[in-house]
C-alpha cells in the first residue's frame, strides 16, 4: 500500500498527520477542533431539545418538581429555624424562693440579679399574686380555700440576656442561681425549646432522605429520557459507528442532553420554590403580625439556588451517563 | 490491500456464511464479489470492515491482522475504509452537505477543511447543487451518490460497496460503477459486492464468485 504503513491506531493519524493529510488532521488542529466540537455538540444537544419543546419541557418539569420538593422544604425549615432563633429569647428561669424569704429580701435579690450582665430582667411574683394567678388559671380555687395558709412560694422569673442565651450559658446561670441561699428551687423552662429543636433535627433529616429519594427519581427520569432518545436515534448511531465514530463521539450529545435537562429542571425548581414562597409570604406576614413579629419569609438565597443548579446538572449528567453506558453498547452495526 | 487466508465465518446457530476463503486484492485493484444471495458476499465485506469477525483463518487489511484490532480501535480502522451500502444509510434529518461531511467531523477536521472537501466530493459525484437539500428530496441514484461521496471523503485507500446498484435501473447502475472506476483510476482499491452479472461482466475487472460460502471461481484481469 502506498502512503506509509497502515495502522488502525488513533496515534497513527497524529504521528503521520503533519505531512500526509490523508491520514488525518494535524495535532494542533485536532486539539483546537476538539474544543470547538465540544462547544458545538453542547449547543447541538440544546437545539435537538428545542425542536421538540413540549416533550423537553415535560421532562424538565418532572425533574423540576422532583427537585422543588426537597429544595422548598429546605427553605421552609431554614425559615422555621430563623423564627426559633428569635424564640430562643423566651428562655426563662423560675426561682422558687424559700418560705421564710420575706418581700424585702426578695426585692433585694431581684435588684441584685438584675444588675448582672447575663440577665435581661427579673419579675417578682409575690406569694399573694401567685395564689391569685393559680386560683384564676387552675380552677382549683375551692381546694385552696380549704387550706389554712397559702402553700405557694414567691417566685422570681429571670430572663437571661439575649447575649447569654446559649444552652451552656443558661445552664451555668442556672447552677449559679441554685446556689443562692434563698432559692428553694430553680427551674429552667427550656424543655419545649429543646423538644422543638429535636423535631427540627428530625425534619432536617427527613428533608435529606426525601432529597436522596427524589434525586434517585431524577436520575431515573433523565436515564429513561436518554434511553428513549438513544432508541429513536438508533439508525444514526449505527451509521456513525460504521463510518468510524468512536463511542466517545456518539456518547457526547446524549451527555449534554442530560446536562441540559438537569439545568432546566433545576431552573424550573427554583422558579417553583420562589413562586410558592411568594404565595405564602402574605399570610405568613399576617400571622407574624398577630404575634407582634416583623418576621418575613426568606426567599431562596444565592447559595441554595447555586446548590440547586449544581445538583440538577450533576444529576442530569449522571442519569445520562448511566443510560448511555447501558444502552449504547447494545447498538452495533450488523 | 486485502488478504484472506482460509477464512471461515460461522454464525451462532451453526450457519456457515464463509468456508475456507482464500484471496488477495492488490493495492489499487478493483474487483467484484458475486454470487447468489446468501452466498456470503455481505459477510465477506463485513469481515473487512470489522462489523463481524472471522471464526477462523486470517484477514489482513493493509498489512494489519484484523484479529488483533481491539474493539476500541475499530472506529479508526473503519475511518480508513470507505463503505457504501445498498440502502444508502444516510441521516435523513441532515442535509446532503452534513451527511457527506460527517466522517470529517468525526475525525476532527476544522470547518474550512470540511467545507472544502465536502464540496470537492459532491462535485465529483455531480451533486454540488444539492448540498443544502435533504436526502428525502433526492432520487435513489442521487442518494447512492451521496453515500459514495461520504465514503470517499476521508480519502480512503480502500472502498467497499455492498450491492451499491441493488435498487437502481441499468443506466443509473452503470453510472455508479463508472464513479467507482474513476476512483480506482486514481489508485483506490475497490471491492464491490454485486449480483448484477450482466453489468459487471461488461467491465474489465476481476470477478470473485462465491457459492454457499466457498470461493467458486476467481476470474478476470488483474490491473
Image: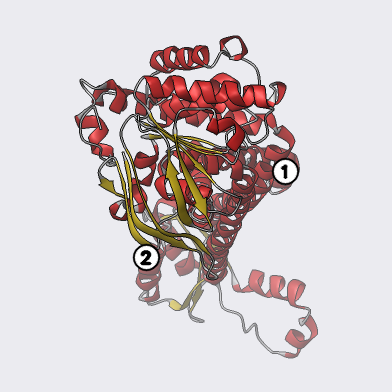
Q: Position of residue A201 (x, y in %)?
A: 52, 65
Q: Choose the circle earlier in sequence order: 2 or 1.
A: 2
Residue B115 visible in rendering = yes
Residue B179 vs residue A178, the one in the foreground = B179
Location of mark 1 (residue): A280
Residue at numbered disc 2: A168
Estimate the x, y position of residue A48 in percent, counting from the top left: 61, 32
Badge 2 marks a residue whose secondary structure is helix
Residue A310 seen in the current view: no
Chain bearing tag 1 is A
- Where, quadrant-wise, is the N terminus of chain B in this rendering? top left
Q: Quadrant of residue A148?
A: bottom right
Which quadrant of the structure image shows residue A274?
top right
- Cα–Cα span, label 2 and label 1: 36 Å
Percent across and percent down for residue B18 are: 46, 58
What residue is rendered at 45% in x and 48% in y? B217
Amino acid at each position: 500500500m502506498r502512503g506509509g504503513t497502515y495502522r488502525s491506531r488513533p496515534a497513527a493519524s497524529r504521528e503521520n498527520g503533519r505531512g500526509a493529510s490523508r491520514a488525518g488532521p494535524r495535532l494542533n488542529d485536532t486539539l483546537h477542533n476538539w474544543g470547538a466540537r465540544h462547544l458545538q455538540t453542547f449547543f447541538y444537544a440544546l437545539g435537538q431539545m428545542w425542536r421538540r419543546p413540549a416533550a423537553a419541557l415535560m421532562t424538565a418539569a418532572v425533574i423540576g418538581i422532583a427537585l422543588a420538593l426537597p429544595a422548598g422544604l429546605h427553605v421552609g425549615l431554614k425559615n422555621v429555624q430563623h423564627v426559633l432563633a428569635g424564640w430562643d429569647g423566651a428562655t426563662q428561669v423560675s426561682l422558687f424562693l424559700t418560705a421564710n424569704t420575706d418581700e424585702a429580701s426578695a426585692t433585694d435579690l431581684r435588684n441584685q440579679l438584675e444588675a448582672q450582665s447575663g440577665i435581661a430582667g427579673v419579675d417578682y411574683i409575690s406569694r399573694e399574686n401567685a395564689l391569685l394567678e393559680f386560683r384564676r388559671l387552675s380552677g382549683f380555687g375551692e381546694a385552696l380555700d380549704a387550706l389554712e395558709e397559702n402553700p405557694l412560694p414567691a417566685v422570681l422569673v429571670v430572663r437571661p440576656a439575649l447575649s447569654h442565651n446559649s444552652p451552656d450559658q443558661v445552664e451555668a446561670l442556672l447552677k449559679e442561681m441554685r446556689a443562692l441561699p434563698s432559692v428553694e428551687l430553680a427551674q429552667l423552662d427550656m424543655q419545649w425549646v429543646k423538644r422543638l429543636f429535636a423535631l427540627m433535627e428530625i425534619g432536617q433529616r427527613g428533608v435529606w432522605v426525601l432529597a436522596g429519594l427524589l434525586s434517585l427519581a431524577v436520575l431515573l427520569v433523565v436515564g429513561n429520557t436518554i434511553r428513549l432518545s438513544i432508541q429513536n436515534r438508533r439508525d444514526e448511531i449505527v451509521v456513525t459507528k460504521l463510518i468510524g465514530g468512536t463511542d466517545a463521539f456518539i456518547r457526547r450529545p446524549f451527555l449534554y442532553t442530560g446536562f441540559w435537562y438537569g439545568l432546566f429542571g433545576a431552573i424550573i425548581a427554583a422558579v417553583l420554590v420562589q413562586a410558592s414562597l411568594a404565595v405564602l409570604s402574605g399570610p405568613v406576614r399576617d400571622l407574624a403580625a398577630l404575634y407582634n413579629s416583623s418576621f418575613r419569609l426568606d426567599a431562596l438565597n444565592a447559595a441554595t439556588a447555586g446548590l440547586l443548579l449544581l445538583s440538577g446538572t450533576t444529576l442530569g449528567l449522571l442519569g445520562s451517563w448511566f443510560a448511555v453506558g447501558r444502552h449504547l453498547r447494545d447498538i452495533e452495526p450488523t | 490491500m486485502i488478504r484472506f487466508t482460509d477464512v471461515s465465518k460461522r454464525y451462532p446457530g451453526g450457519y456457515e456464511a464463509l468456508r475456507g476463503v482464500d484471496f488477495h486484492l492488490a493495492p489499487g485493484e478493483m474487483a467484484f464479489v458475486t454470487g447468489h444471495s446468501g452466498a456470503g458476499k455481505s459477510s465477506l465485506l463485513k469481515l473487512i470492515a470489522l462489523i463481524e469477525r472471522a471464526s477462523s483463518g486470517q484477514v489482513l487489511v493493509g498489512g494489519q491482522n484484523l484479529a488483533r484490532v481491539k474493539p476500541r480501535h475499530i472506529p479508526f480502522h473503519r475511518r480508513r475504509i470507505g463503505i457504501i451500502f445498498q440502502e444508502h444509510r444516510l441521516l435523513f434529518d441532515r442535509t446532503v452537505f452534513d451527511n457527506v461531511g460527517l466522517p470529517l467531523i468525526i475525525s476532527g477536521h476544522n470547518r474550512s477543511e470540511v467545507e472544502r472537501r465536502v464540496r470537492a466530493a459532491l462535485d465529483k459525484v455531480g451533486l454540488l447543487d444539492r448540498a443544502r437539500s435533504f436526502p428525502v428530496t433526492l432520487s435513489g441514484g442521487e442518494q447512492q451518490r451521496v453515500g459514495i461521496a461520504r465514503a470517499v471523503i476521508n480519502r480512503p485507500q480502500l472502498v467497499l460497496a455492498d450491492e451499491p446498484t441493488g435498487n437502481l435501473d441499468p443506466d443509473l447502475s452503470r453510472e455508479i460503477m463508472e464513479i467507482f472506476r474513476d476512483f480506482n483510476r486514481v489508485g483506490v482499491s475497490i471491492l464491490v459486492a454485486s449480483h448484477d452479472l450482466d453489468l459487471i461482466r461488461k467491465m474489465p475487472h476481476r470477478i470473485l464468485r462465491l457459492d454457499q460460502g466457498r470461493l467458486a471461481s476467481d476470474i478476470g484481469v488483474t490491473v
